Amino acid sequence: MSVSTSNNFTLVVICSLFLLISAIHYEPNWKSIDSRPLPSWYDEGKIGIMLTWGVFSVPSFTTEWFWEQWVTGTPSVVAFMQQNYRPDFTYADFAPMFQAEFFDPNKWADIFQAAGARYVVHMTKHHEGFTSWPSKYSFNWNAMDVGPKRDLVGALASAIRNRTNIHFGLYHSLFEWYNPLFEKDQANKFQTNDFVMRKTLPELYEIVNMYKPDIIWSDGDWMAPDWYWNATIFLAWLYNESPVKDTVVVNDRWGSNARCKHGGFLNCNDKFNPGKLQPRKWENCMSIDRYSWGYRRPATVNQLYSIEDLIALLVETVSYGGNLLVDVGPTSYGTIAPIFEERLRQMGSWLGVNGDAIYATKPWTYQNDSMTPRVWYTSKTGASGVEVYAITTKWPESVLILGDPQVAMDTTVSLLGYPGSLKYKPGATGGIEIYVPQLTIANIPCDWAWTFKMVGLKNA
């Protein structure tokens, strides 16, 4: 067969596969929707950044649930309002103060790129109902009509796509705390769904068509089942007809009966970390501020994730087959606080050395070592066969003893970021003993965690 004929044959095969995939039609039921393969970019990406930003960023006192806490009488919130605002002040009065006057989407995009993120999830609307885009379905309660007077979603989408290769995604809350339509449906025990038909669904169709996101990260689902939200009908449209039908991924928060069961990948609960390998793709969505997703002015350093803890959580999550979605809360004036920016850049610095052990990896036979604690495994297929990575969050003194890798005659071991191969020997009762180079602070390849790469193992 000639080269030309071979290339033509390959092209025909690729086109045929594309047509076959495009011809698949998903029905509005979970069996059909759950059968859709997860686009590979999401699993390979491993690391995302979530942005929790809205009117709640103005008081920035407790959490993004500030309005709900005020209405329900949380003592600290009530006292805060009494001490700092006039008696007739309403939550809506915070909206004009949400100015985002220092918001520079290009700078944000550069920070996320430096962090090593492969996707970003930008908040379009939290449970307060304020939309960060000029929605036709949120009159005078959106970022174009009041506050920033700007399309915050569109600005960041353009910056991300023009300056990076990061996938752009959107967070959207299905419900709103004090929307009269939702309160009426709730009073009717969700046997009516006027709120969904007049607000939730139109907004979802609007943001998909306007911004063409690669992720729809749904939330606010827990009070009603999926049929109230018309979830499967929307997802069938998303997978069959939308402008992102071949690339988009979604989470599992589409109804009280769907969470942790259905959708593209599983969030289950906030800060979900199952501690073991899962049968389905999952995501650990966590916040650098341990007590809030949104920006919180009273936060102290000891209430934030240290970079050591953040890297350790990233490594553990990926070893169990998950993705890590790292949340930061921007300020009301449109900046990412220096302490959050530092954490993100530190994470990116570490990934610059150790990214091969994270991106596009798969869980290995073992997730953590059976002999030495604080060692986590990942793997991938490389040019020389299966590569197994042992990532330790404690620098070994002179020898790293691992109980699970089984060496062969041609096994090679290296330290990511350090030139050359490392010496080793089979362990006395199996496993491997790796001789660790004696390094100084000046020539150690990175901080916080270190990756030993093994190629040619018997049990790879």
Image (spheres, rainbow, N blue to C red):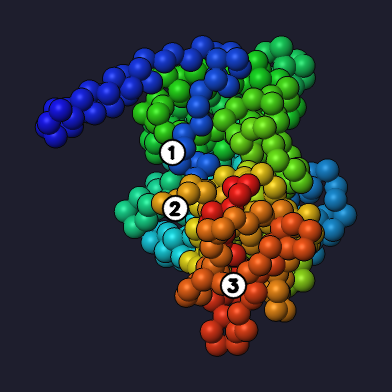
| Mark 3 residue element | loop
Name the mark on residue 384. Answer: 2
Give neighbour class at mark 2: few <14, some 14-19, many 20+ (Cα, 10 Å): few
Question: Looking at the image, is mark 2 or mark 1 earlier in the sequence?
Answer: 1
**Marks 3 and 2, Cα distance to the nearest angstrom?**
19 Å
Does the image show residue 299?
no
Depicted 338 relative to depicted 132: above or below? below
Question: Looking at the image, is mark 1 or mark 3 earlier in the sequence?
Answer: 1
Is disc 3 in contact with disc 2, using a CB cutoff of under 8 Å?
A: no
Q: In the rendered structure, which amino acid carries the disc numbered 2?
A: Ser
Q: Position of residue 130 (x, y in %)?
A: 57, 42
Name the mark on residue 213. Answer: 1
Compare residues 87 and 455 and report the one nearer the observer: 455
Is disc 2 in contact with disc 1, using a CB cutoff of under 8 Å?
A: no
The residue singled out by tag 3 in the image is: 423
Q: Position of residue 37 (x, y in %)?
A: 50, 27
Q: Which quadrant would the N terminus be assigned to in this image?
A: top left
| Side of 59 where 47 appears, left or right | left
Q: Quadrant location of residue 357?
A: bottom right
